[in-house]
Image (spheres, coloured by chain):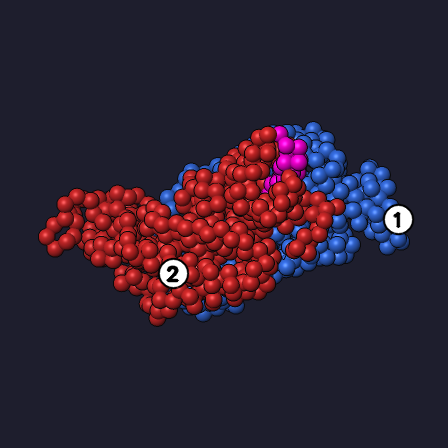
Chain colours: A red, B blue
Amino acid sequence: MTVPPSRPTRIDTMRERNLALVLREVARGQPVTRARLAEVTGLTKTTVASQVALLEELRLVTTAGPVREGGRGRPGAPVSLAAGPVAGLGLEINGHYLAACVLDPTGEVRLSQTVACDNRGRDARETLEALGTLAQWVIARAAETGLDVVGTGVALPGVITEGNVNAPNLGWESVPAAALISGALHGQVFGVIVDNEANLGALGELWYGAGQGAGSYLYLSGETGIGAGIVVDGELFRGAHGSAGEIGHVVVDPRGTTCRCGGTGCLELVAGIDAVLLAAGLADDVGASEPGLAELLRRLDDGDRAARGAIEAAGQGLATALVGAVNLLDPDTIVLGGLHAHLAPWLTPAIEAAVAHGGGKLRGGRPAIRASALAAESAVRGAAGTVLAAVLADPSALA
Amino acid sequence: MTVPPSRPTRIDTMRERNLALVLREVARGQPVTRARLAEVTGLTKTTVASQVALLEELRLVTTAGPVREGGRGRPGAPVSLAAGPVAGLGLEINGHYLAACVLDPTGEVRLSQTVACDNRGRDARETLEALGTLAQWVIARAAETGLDVVGTGVALPGVITEGNVNAPNLGWESVPAAALISGALHGQVFGVIVDNEANLGALGELWYGAGQGAGSYLYLSGETGIGAGIVVDGELFRGAHGSAGEIGHVVVDPRGTTCRCGGTGCLELVAGIDAVLLAAGLADDVGASEPGLAELLRRLDDGDRAARGAIEAAGQGLATALVGAVNLLDPDTIVLGGLHAHLAPWLTPAIEAAVAHGGGKLRGGRPAIRASALAAESAVRGAAGTVLAAVLADPSALA
């Protein structure tokens, strides 16, 4: 869901398309010479030179080596993405924290801030106000280091329909989050983009983490809830109504208990982090926070029976759900993300065994199972990355 | 999986692309005038006229109204697809029958033949020989009515990897089906295309049945096994290794029995047609044939307890698997196909209730659940349709 930025609709001219084309090829092959850019884009060298000059004016690319009089780089010197001042802001509301990060066009994290707080059941407007305050603080700090935030991506643990958010694990029902956040962050060229945290986590992995190079993969975000981001040939698969990937509500025990979603025996009732901690005998107030997780990991290492039982049940639930997902979607790779990334050594064996057996005789190949390299940061990085993707798609908006 | 047809690689010229473009627009908008074709393709009227003339020579299109001297239609008269002589052959190997059908370019069924026989556990070469004999007989009968089969699509109940087929329900392991069938059916311009029956069933529904107009849907083929064809924005989704859609091996009972696939509690163990008939107390030798099904339907109407229990278990299994599929894929529509199409009135209520509850609070929309209009014919129609799709994509191959 995108809230249209507050600028007039522009005419999509050939020149604007060429500008985007040149910038995309710089991003793909950097550092890259103008001659090579002409070769891969099919544009004339003159056109490439003028587009590169414009991208330099917009401060999106730089030319290596000494600059000529007039401030432009040498024609033969390779062109790279600039490490600022243009920047994208990523924000995330999780059950247990608020997070923000700022990426420059090279994808480098220039600022990052996480605030631990319990957002489950907290008033939605209050949570969104706290997020707005965090965002403004981060934007101001970024400005001090010369960075100019041109757009914001926001990751939310729910399903977003026309800017309204249903997030049972936060207690949110039809909260107009996109409008509320946009109100607090006006004036950005690329506006505010609100999306599901598992979708943004999958994009974070695709752009900056374990998904790089995998064509089709299933990214699992294991937090209080469990979402999946489905990437097919490098593109996010969203489904007919934008709510694909709700793997937390796949039924893993038809005789199980009732879920907040209205269903029975859902995956997140046994494999969501809160459920695992509770089953392990860790008080709910520890929550699915990093300290609670650290204590769980300590008990697992110590051979604590309740902890081991809880992780075994979680592994079995994930195995059942993932056998289904693998049979339906046939992915290259499964990435365990969010807090599940830290539990991967305990969860992976059960998943691998089940995937090898369930339908195994039918398949051409078996997916690799990996822990996310970014863990809890995937979603906020993906959120910031969507702004950079928007810049790449239409750099002339910055002119 | 496509076996390359036995013709040299041609150069993809502009003229060939224009020919395909004009044919595709005729197929999309028929009957359509040359003036309209020029408008929608962006080609000049002269180019359109010459391409239409060539398509008439290839006997792929006809012009309505009286023909001029020289055999070509009047320039102002609308152009339509020809109802022959070019034709596509569809073949299917099912556990309980062999089927063939011939479609002309308008999609009309010109010939269709089904031979009941038990192919489960039968020697693969023997089954393929019987299919070859059926194919040759149908091709000869088609020729008698002036139809020229230019290619063959084959639907198989298994996973196809580089022309080799694993089909546990037939007892096939790595059978080189594509090569064997191609040997029996040489000389066709578009060769032999071998694909999974659920994939071809989904395409049959998309082109000729309940899928028309639905952007993203899940087609279920309920036979001895249960496969799914996943259509996303009008395109078949195949997964990373070509084995997406194996919904029959989604786990619906983690405490269930072991399946032929190696997994536990798979959907087809409770909802496959053989499983339903067995649970209903219908002898296995009745098989998943139309007579066995007719007897099951009679008993269901009579309120027979075993039959009702069997269908209830099947409905619950389907409900569990489909809640998972809906949460993962978020389709517009679910089409119950194959023999499940006949059982739809008995199966749909449990599925609808489960889909409404499971994850229901999270979703933007709920998929419609429909019975296939083509029932057991979807796959063989889709198989023949792939030939027509190949003709549409490259009509110049017929020159």
Amino acid type of the residue tagged 2 in the rendering = Gln
Which of B344 and B399 lies nearest the eye of the viewer?
B344
Amino acid type of the residue tagged 1 in the rendering = Arg
Is residue A70 visible in this depiction of the protein?
Answer: yes
Q: Which residues are magenta?
A: A303-325
x, y percentage for residue B322? 67, 50
Residue at (59%, 63%) from the top-left corner? A173
Q: Quadrant of the C terminus of chain A?
A: bottom left
Q: Which label is found at residue B305?
A: 1
Which of B181 and A1 lies nearest the eye of the viewer?
A1
Residue at (42%, 58%) from the top-left corner? A134
Q: Which label is found at residue A136?
A: 2
Per the picture, the main secondary structure of the magenta-coloured stretch is helix
x, y percentage for residue A290? 51, 43
Magenta span has A305? yes
Tell me the distance, in whole angstroms, between the alpha carbons under discs 1 and 2: 67 Å
x, y percentage for residue A270? 65, 43
User: Helix, strand or loop at disc 1?
Assistant: helix
Q: Is residue B124 above or below residue B312?
A: above
Of marks 1 and 2, the one in the foreground:
2
In the image, taking residue B41 as reference, residue A28 lies left or right, namely: left
Residue at (10%, 52%) from the top-left corner? A69
x, y percentage for residue A197? 50, 52
The quadrant in which residue A319 appears is top right
User: Helix, strand or loop at disc 2?
Assistant: helix
Residue at (29%, 61%) from the top-left corner? A398
Which of A77 and A384 lies nearest the eye of the viewer?
A384
